[in-house]
Amino acid sequence: MGDLSKHFSKHEMWCNCGCRRGVPHPFLLTKLEFLRSLTAAAMYINTRNHRGGSCPEYNAKIGGSLGSYHIVRWDPIIRAELFLAVDFESAVKDPLELARIIEKMDLDIGGQGIYYTISRPGGRVIMKPGFMHWDFGRPKRKDGGRRKWIHFRYGNKTKYIWLPKNRGFLQYSHYQLVDLAVETMNRG
Ligand SMILES: [Zn+2]
Ligand SMILES: [Zn+2]
């Protein structure tokens, strides 16, 4: 039993710098708990390069954007420092699978990003699952599209692929993801 919800505790959510700031917005926590129960497998937040909340100082230090939903902000009604985004990985589900479950269950309010590290040693394509970013910030982009993206890291480069306006993760298979990875690496 966690001290925030059935499966989650504060220490998993705090900023990585050790300042112990930040709890997820109750709305975000509820959805997270729902997803955790649905997948029935451990979920890891704030480990390695994932994040729960970040204090503004730490966010700046790691080069996070100024408008990041991971940044903790004082909420005058709940009277706590809250954040609106979590990065997590599941013990059994790949990021694409998690994104598909969220979409299928109609939990996709805000932004969703899936993160992979890709490489091609000796011509063989390797896709290493990273984590999934989930936030309850602004639901749409300026062009009206939803904020859904695929993020590839390869060598020292990174690439964001925004999903087209009317396309979700349910329209992507793992094979298409691999194709996108190959395309990304071919372009350099
Ligand atoms: Zn901090
Ligand atoms: Zn994130």
Image (spheres, helix red, strand yellow):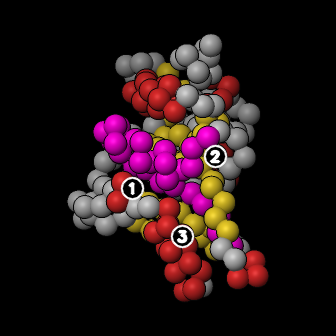
Residue 113: x and y in percent read 47, 54
Q: CA distance from mark 1 to mark 3?
A: 14 Å
Q: Quadrant of residue 172?
A: bottom left
- 131 and 65: which is toward the camera: 131
**Foreground tag (1 vs 2):** 1
Amino acid type of the residue tagged 2 in the rendering: His
Earlier-in-chain disc, 1 versus 2: 2
Residue 71: x and y in percent read 53, 41
Q: Mark 1–mark 2 contact, CB under 8 Å?
A: no
Magenta-span inclusion, residue 84: no
- The span picked out in magenta is 92-119
Magenta-span inclusion, residue 111: yes
Residue 89: x and y in percent read 61, 43
**Foreground tag (2 vs 3):** 3
Earlier-in-chain disc, 1 versus 3: 1
Question: Which disc number belongs to residue 178?
Answer: 3
Which residue bears the numbered disc 2? 50
What residue sits 52% from the left and 80% below the top? 183
Residue 79 showing in the rendered view:
yes
Which residue bears the numbered disc 1? 169
Q: Is residue 175 above or below residue 36?
A: below
Say which element carries label 2.
Answer: loop
Earlier-in-chain disc, 2 versus 3: 2
- The local crowd at label 3, few if under 14, some if 14 to 19, many if 20 or more residues have their Cα within 10 Å, is some
Give the quarter of the figure containing the C terminus: bottom right
What residue sits 53% from the left and 40% below the top? 86
Amino acid type of the residue tagged 3 in the rendering: Val
Q: CA distance from mark 2 to mark 3?
A: 23 Å
- The local crowd at label 1, few if under 14, some if 14 to 19, many if 20 or more residues have their Cα within 10 Å, is many
Instruction: Answer yes or no: disc 1 within 8 Å of ligand 2.
Output: no
Q: Mark 2–mark 3 contact, CB under 8 Å?
A: no
